Image: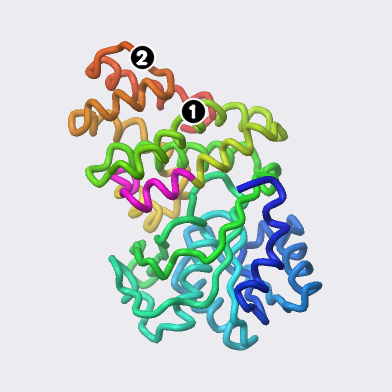
Amino acid sequence: VAGGASQQLCAQAARLGGRRALLVTDSTMVASGLAKRCADQLAAANIPATVFSGVKPDPTDENVRNGLELLRQESCDLVVGLGGGSPMDAAKVIAVAATNDAPLREFAGYHRIARAGLPLVLIPTTAGTGSEVTKVAVITDTERDVKMMMLDVHLLANVALVDFELSLTMPASLTAHVGVDTLTHGIEAYVSRKANALTDPLAEQCIRLAAANLLTAWAEPNNRPAREAMMLAACLGGMAFANSSVCLVHGMSRPIGAIFHLAHGLSNALLLPEITRWSLPGAVARYAQVARWVNAAPGNAPDDSAAASLPDYLEQLNARLGIG
């Protein structure tokens, strides 16, 4: 996790024994020139790279199948995912689909992937999903209009190159949406019934960093310390919820995304204040602690009043970010 970390792509690809790479990305990364830059770096290190840019927001089983077909056609033995959560999730599933013969829908659920996938390097360009450090992927089944949640250790990348400099060109709206998504990951990992002593410190740092830096990163896109803090927050949030769990915000966001094709980060941001208000009685002390960390309540506020202040804070944060 550092500025310039993406420059280690070639060294890491070689360390993993890659001879031909499939670079899984989207049209935005192609238009920005970043996909070509990564492919050229690999080619210069004698690792030819084929670019698959057919990943759509909220990736589908068709995206995965098309990427897998190209991978086999080009005899690729390494997968690189570049972009936001969608390209990274698609890259994860392409990597395991290459080594497992089962239909994609059989991967849905917990621990359903029999064999490890191809070596996988993930490079996030948005400070949001934390997908680069999770063992989770979400792929839409286009036949059923269902978002298939897959959780398996074989979906975990071999290498994550977390370079905040790649997030400097994010537009303000995307910064806002994925930033609140990051905050959601921290909050849900902390209030989950599966929260534990290992995930709590990760969730706390995610929440504190997002609360302290999101508005600055949104208002001042070239503010490097704020961008770096948000990229770190996203990574910490991913580690936190991957080893705890997400909760109702994500539970409601998935069907909204599958049916109405609303971007995941925006969907989470819109749901977060009201779901938090509804969920308060289930974890008053924990929501109160979150409220203190984001300075929605003073440190000495009683749990009930501190927790009650959190939904209003989240509504105001959305309003300040132009979400609504």
| 317, 8: nearer the viewer | 8
Residue shown at 46% from the left, 67% from the top: 60
SS at mark 2? loop
Percent across and percent down for residue 15 are 64, 72
Task: Please say if 264 is above or below 97.
Answer: above
- In the image, taking residue 73 as reference, residue 187 lies left or right, namely left
SS at mark 1? helix
Mark 1–mark 2 Cα distance, whole angstroms, equals 15 Å
How many marks on residues?
2
Within 10 Å of disc 2 (Cα), the crowding (few <14, some 14-19, many 20+) is few
| 135, 31: nearer the viewer | 135
Q: Which residues are magenta?
A: 236-250
Outermost residue to the left: 281
Q: Which residue is mark 1?
A: 211
Q: Disc 2 residue type?
A: Gly
Magenta stretch, main secondary structure class? helix
Percent across and percent down for residue 235 are 51, 47
Q: Are marks 1 and 2 in contact (CB under 8 Å)?
A: no
Q: Which residue is mark 2?
A: 299
Residue 6: numbered disc: none
- In the image, taking residue 153 as reference, residue 75 lies left or right, namely right
Q: In the figure, residue 23 lies in which quadrant?
A: bottom right
Task: Please say if 144 is above or below 199.
Answer: below
Q: Is residue 239 one of those drawn in magenta?
A: yes
Residue shown at 66% from the left, 57% from the top: 28
Task: Please say if 154 is above or below 34.
Answer: below
Q: In the figure, residue 84 lies in which quadrant?
A: bottom right
Percent across and percent down for residue 191 are 28, 37
Q: Earlier in the sequence, mark 1 or mark 2?
A: 1
Task: Please say if 274 is above or below 117.
Answer: above
Q: Disc 1 residue type?
A: Ala
Residue shown at 49% from the left, 28% from the top: 211
